[in-house]
Image (tube, rainbow, N blue to C red):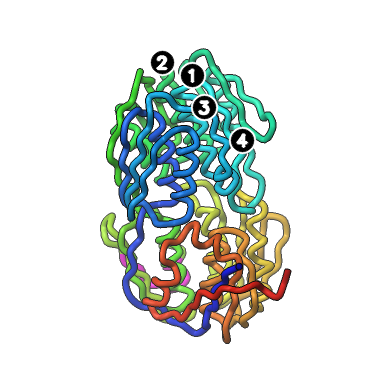
Amino acid sequence: MSEHFDVHGGARLVGEVDVVGAKNSVLKLMAAALLAEGTTTITNCPQILDVPLMGDVLRSVGCEVEIEGDTARITTPAELSHRADSAAMGKLRASVCVLGPLVGRLKQAVVALPGGDAIGQRPLDMHQNGLRKLGATSTIEHGCVVAKAETLVGTQIWLDFPSVGATENILMAAVLAEGTTVIDNAAREPEIADICTMLTEMGAKIEGAGTSTLTVHGVEALHPTEHRVIGDRIVGATWAFAASMTRGDLTVRGVNPHHLDLVLDKLRLAGAEVTTYDDKGFRVVQPERPKAVDWVTLPYPGFATDLQPFAVALSAVSEGTSMITENVYEARFRFIEEMIRLSGDARTDGHHAVVRGVEKLSSAPVWASDIRAGAGLVLAGLCADGVTEVWDVFHIDRGYPHFVENLNRLGARIDRVTGEPERA
């Protein structure tokens, strides 16, 4: 049976909320455990569906995985399988990040093509080209990425686009390569720096974490470690948008506000009062209706494409007209079709959307197409009259631990309901 959320409109969110470890980091950290024989412990893991799914992926290559609360313990054997083609691979995009560690350690890998959110094409060309530069062959065969190398040798690699996934896979292959690898135009996301920190704790030699140039000096072997995942900036930003949209007052703990500088500055332009607390959290107070601002998605430190649905939802209830430009994933604007069901006034033209704010949205049944779209629809439902049904909430569960419970504690009224939708 399907589940949906009944979201009662009219809520003003007030209170404090804690952010746990970053989804976009923990899954890659789990994959990095493949690089060292022994038990690696990862703490501050978010209790979301993707973590046990990644556990299944690691078990498929021979690891023992124990997940208890916010802690994951991964015991990697001396003899690993190079085939990662379990059913779990098709359920999350991040599963492809086992490619780099397997090639780095075993010099071969067969990795099933990943699944994940329906937000547009995310080709693996740069992943494969990076491995080829290091000396591996890489092809797509029977629905799998197949890579093999006699040896991996450090080299200069230029990425045409600062792809997070490609940066991660090349980085994790390069740490055990011979010589020095330089990755230019590397992704700069905080999650990349988090992986570099953990790899360094395991014995890797990496320079330039957090910059566009990563220099990796290959080592012969890595050792297990214990590592705490950084706070989830996307979840933290979700709460920031929630405060602004509902004209609320939220204090968000457990995330570095400097990872959200651009978001918080934009919310200030929208009329929010924002206070930051060193690297521990922030507070957003929205005293009156938000003002319209423009948004442009770009790789970090630009505005994250993951947050684009929240920019659209905020714009839909703001005073004035906003322009949202999507430069990363072409299918992100599918979210706007659902916002129009909620009486949002929005139009799209290629990579651009124009959203004219309305005082209040109108409830309707809507469908989540991905994690962030689902959360955005819940926030929009809080700003609508009546009760909004948000369907396909399994997406939301993949990215937000205790989302409904947190919202209800902050002043919302949301019910999780089991049953089939009227629409097929």
Q: Residue at x 67, y 61 (%)?
A: 334
Look at label 1 and name its amino acid.
Thr
Q: Which residue is mark 3?
A: 82
Q: Tag 2 or tag 4, which sits nearer the N-term?
A: 4
In which quarter of the view is residue 410 placed?
A: bottom left
Gap in angstroms between the C-alphas marked 3 and 2? 23 Å
Relative horizontal placement of residue 403, taking residue 99 as reference (left or right): left
Residue nearest the observer in this picture, 320 or 93: 93
Relative horizontal placement of residue 281, taking residue 25 as reference (left or right): left
Q: Residue at x 67, y 30 (%)?
A: 140
Q: Tag 4 or tag 3, which sits nearer the N-term?
A: 3
Gap in angstroms between the C-alphas marked 4 and 1? 20 Å
Look at label 3 and name its amino acid.
His
Question: Are the residues at dot 2 and dot 1 in contact (C-beta closer than 8 Å)?
Answer: yes
Gap in angstroms between the C-alphas marked 4 and 2? 25 Å
Please report the bounds of the magenta region as a residue range.
267-275
Label 2 sits on a secondary structure element that is: loop
User: What x and y, as percent, mark residue 105?
Assistant: 44, 23
Q: Is residue 257 magenta?
A: no
Q: Tag 1 or tag 2, which sits nearer the N-term?
A: 1
Q: Which residue is mark 2?
A: 179
Question: Are the residues at dot 4 and dot 2 in contact (C-beta closer than 8 Å)?
Answer: no
Gap in angstroms between the C-alphas marked 2 and 1? 8 Å
The mark found on residue 124 in the picture is 4
Look at label 2 and name its amino acid.
Gly
Q: Tag 1 or tag 4, which sits nearer the N-term?
A: 4
The mark found on residue 155 in the picture is 1
Q: Is residue 294 visible?
A: no
User: What x and y, as percent, mark residue 343?
Assistant: 66, 78
